[in-house]
Amino acid sequence: VARKMADFLVLPAAQGLVIKPLTDKITVRAVSDGIEITSEGGLHLSRSADTGSAQQSPQKAKAAAAGKSMFDFATWRGQPGETFTQTRQRLQQTIVDVPEAERNRARLELARFYFAHGYGEEAAALLAYLAKQVPDLTAHADFMAITGASKILAYRPEEGLKDLSTPLLTGQPEIELWQAVAEAELRNWPAAEEKFAITESMLGGYPEPFYSRFAVLSVEAALAAGKDHEAADWIDRFESGPHRDAANPAIAYLHGVLFAKAGRASAAEEAWKEADASNDRLYKIRAELALIDLGVSTRSLTPAQAADRLEALRFGWRGDDLEVDILHRLGQFYIQARNVKAGLNTLSKAVQLYPNSPLTPQIHDEMSGIFHDVFLGDLGKNLSPLDALTLYQQYRSLMPTGADGIAVTHNLAERLVAIDLLDQAADLLEDLVKNKLHGEERAHTGARLAAIRLLDHKPDAALAALDYDKGESFPPDLQNERLLLRAKALSDLHHDDEALALLHDNTSEAARLLRADITMHAQHWSDAAKALLELIGEPPKTGGALSHNQAEWLVNCAIAMSLDGDQVGLDKLAIDYGAAMAKTPENDTFRILTQPEKTTQLRDIASAQAKIADVDMFQSFLNNYRKMENAESSDRK
């Protein structure tokens, strides 16, 4: 093929090489691996388009590539009889010894040497330096081929694929082999398997360390793509070829995968144990992972035991997708063992360490599902409220949107109320009321928020919660709840007349209870006694019993009458309810209050009357209200 250089021409020839110098300074000589053309002071460079090198047709390029590898591994590895170190030192010394103008050629020889021995990072670094020194090199197909291949060897597949995608390499079958390797490193298994299938014969001519690494990837790709038969064929060819000893642990591991997919668990276990017993750290760890998975599937290991075994592997491998896989499985086993906190922390660590891993989106989706199940499913059933709050605060970014997110917040709030973390629970509900809810749902949650604020002795905050929806029209039951809560808050703020005015026409038991509570604390003893008698109701029939609440209300009624000096009322109370009260634990206090002249325990009477400051009859309503809300939140779930 004709070439036109600045200093010489390469003439078309049927055989051999014809070079026509354009200056008398050109020197041409044969070397071990071809023809060397030099010039005093160095050759001048021409654009690739001027040389004619880009004019070679894809068909000719493909035909040439099919007959011979683009990479002359045997020549590039060094002279026969030299060790690796001897060849490297000789090439490095050559760079120092040759004139400055010839050093880039010597550097290229060193890069090829590193590449031929599988040292991708070293080769890629030298080639990158050469590309900066001589930019026109990137216009040559052979330079781009070794550059892209070196990056793939260095586990930089994205960069390697970019270099190999140049039009200069279009139609080169060997490039597809390297693209297959890169796709496998990226876990694009179907694409990798397809390219490995059409470059199988080419791979057969590759030396070590290339053949074993690439052949193992081809088996991995076939297995991941569901081509089990093709994977078995690859393994058979590997085991019958000259490279068997180079990858025994890998082949043992992959045999185990094939056996497992075929349902032969015992054969898979034996193969994985063989790999686990090897000195190959990668396949030792992968085999141990597989054995743990097998143990869990056959129930010879519990998820907790599997997690313990995986913890031992956690620090055994770092820096790539295998570590992601270890952390992913460890997190899953923790979740299966109901150790939610450890599970989420482990999965979060995987996402933080490897945000760009192909597994990361899947892990993030799993974490979202776990968060949902903790608060809306059975997963968090045995989780303490404090642990639930910690998980909520730590992983709030996983909060589901819409109705599920609202339900999660309600659920957590109720857990916090159950352990008297009222302020934290109220803050959660206040965010819902202010920012996320509307209409009746907002009013209902506002009432719940007001009740929690009252339980926390914050009446001002309770009124503020009710005022978020002031003036809107709601169902009668909800309106009544909100009215009672407002009246209680006003009472706690000592606005007793205003509170009683709200309850004036309300005949519900809760309203009567609150009215009695307010009048007691306002020291309106006569009104308090009247309100309590309405609550207590008619005396029970002979032999009848009083409820616990009725007995307590009777004691409070007796206190009010006693403080009001209503001895007639006390006598009637003793006559009407004495027999029934005799059967209750409150009988002694009731008898002292209603018949003090028959006892000498005036100190006890004073003590009973002093308890009026501690009377909070409506608190029982709030506690019942809390239980009712818990039940309703369960219904919403």
Image (spheres, grey):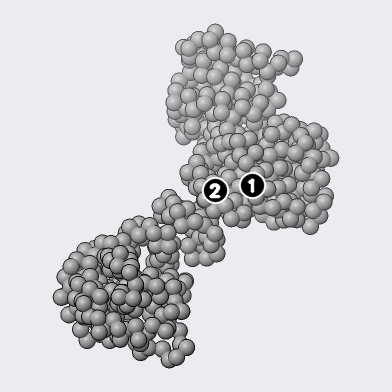
In the image, residue 126 above or below residue 248: above
Task: Name the element at disc 2.
Answer: helix
> Which of pointers 2 and 1 lies earlier in the amino acid sequence?
1
Numbered marks: total: 2
Amino acid type of disc 2?
Ala
Q: Which mark is residue 452?
A: none
Mark 1 is on which residue type?
A: Ala
Residue 31, position as x, y percentages in the image: 65, 16
* In this rendering, position of residue 307 left or right of residue 554: right
Q: Secondary structure at mark 1?
A: helix
- Determine the residue positioned at 71% across, 16% down: 83
Which residue is most to the top? 97
Q: Residue at x 52, y 65 (%)?
A: 377
Q: Where does the image place residue 200, in percent across and percent down from the top left?
A: 72, 44
State the residue position of label 2.
Answer: 342
Q: Can you say whether 441 is above or below 476 in the image?
A: above
Q: Residues within 10 Å of mark 1 (few under 14, many from 20)?
A: many
Decide which of 456, 176 is in the foreground and name it: 456
Tag 2 and tag 1, C-beta contact below 8 Å: yes
Snapshot quadrant of residue 487: bottom left
Q: Is residue 367 above or below residue 550?
A: above
User: Which mark, residue 307?
Assistant: 1
